[in-house]
Image (cartoon, grey):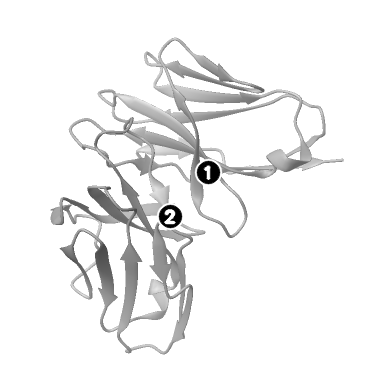
Amino acid sequence: DAGVIQSPRHEVTEMGQEVTLRCKPISGHDYLFWYRQTMMRGLELLIYFNNNVPIDDSGMPEDRFSAKMPNASFSTLKIQPSEPRDSAVYFCASSWRGRVVGELFFGEGSRLTVL
Amino acid sequence: RKEVEQDPGPFNVPEGATVAFNCTYSNSASQSFFWYRQDCRKEPKLLMSVYSSGNEDGRFTAQLNRASQYISLLIRDSKLSDSATYLCVVNPPNAGNMLTFGGGTRLMVKP
């Protein structure tokens, strides 16, 4: 079975550019999470969706960040304009309410470098 | 105070050693607890859940102390392949499937 699929795996961009990260959750999963990981701050939850509806976006750093989930099989995280401090690994994860709480399935991550 | 705190390490141990990590959490109403493992430059993966009565999975033992709000992970007979970062994870109350991760403890097992 396919796991969570993220793209791009690596992105290098210049300050001020728009960045769009994409995620395809595991089929049948009804929760989708966007996390950001840095050495300084560890794994931080940015936003999560349940049945395509944003439930908690309190972790989104500021208005430059936005996330959408137009359908059950696709989500995007957009940063506009990007800044060097946004450099991090962005993970998408999905889970299913029917499973034991706590088992998130992570994608391989999108490593973003903003110059 | 961070919601989930861990000693970042690294813990450097020889093969065959026993090593233990602790983690503290701030929300006393948290219900569910887990350990995840993250290999270098890879995604986190669930290692094991932590039950109130303590639980074992092979060489790994997890324990929960609700009164002191800490969770532990014990690894016996360490293998080289155990080298990774171990993330303490908490499911806060009324948060559905949302998880809060600690910063991780890095373990390096040496030959």
Residue B58 as seen in the image, left or right of residue A40: right
State the quadrant of the N terminus of chain B: top left
Q: Position of residue A57 (x, y in %)?
A: 18, 56
Q: Nearer the viewer, residue A65 or A70?
A: A70
Residue B69 image-quadrant placement: top left
Residue type at mark 2: give it.
Answer: Gly
Q: Alpha-carbon neighbours of circle 2 within 10 Å: few (<14), some, or many (≥20)?
A: some
Q: Can residue A61 be seen in the rendering of this structure?
A: no
Residue A100 as seen in the image, left or right of residue A11: left
The residue that label 2 is drawn on is: A3
Compared to residue A7, the image places residue A55 above or below, namely above
In the image, what residue occupies the spot 31% across and 33% down? A99
Q: Position of residue A11 (x, y in %)?
A: 46, 80
Compared to residue A82, the image places residue B38 above or below, namely above
In the image, what residue occupies the spot 24% across and 62% down? A60
Q: Which mark is residue B104?
A: 1
Residue B26 as seen in the image, left or right of residue B58: left
In the image, what residue occupies the spot 73% across and 24% down? B18
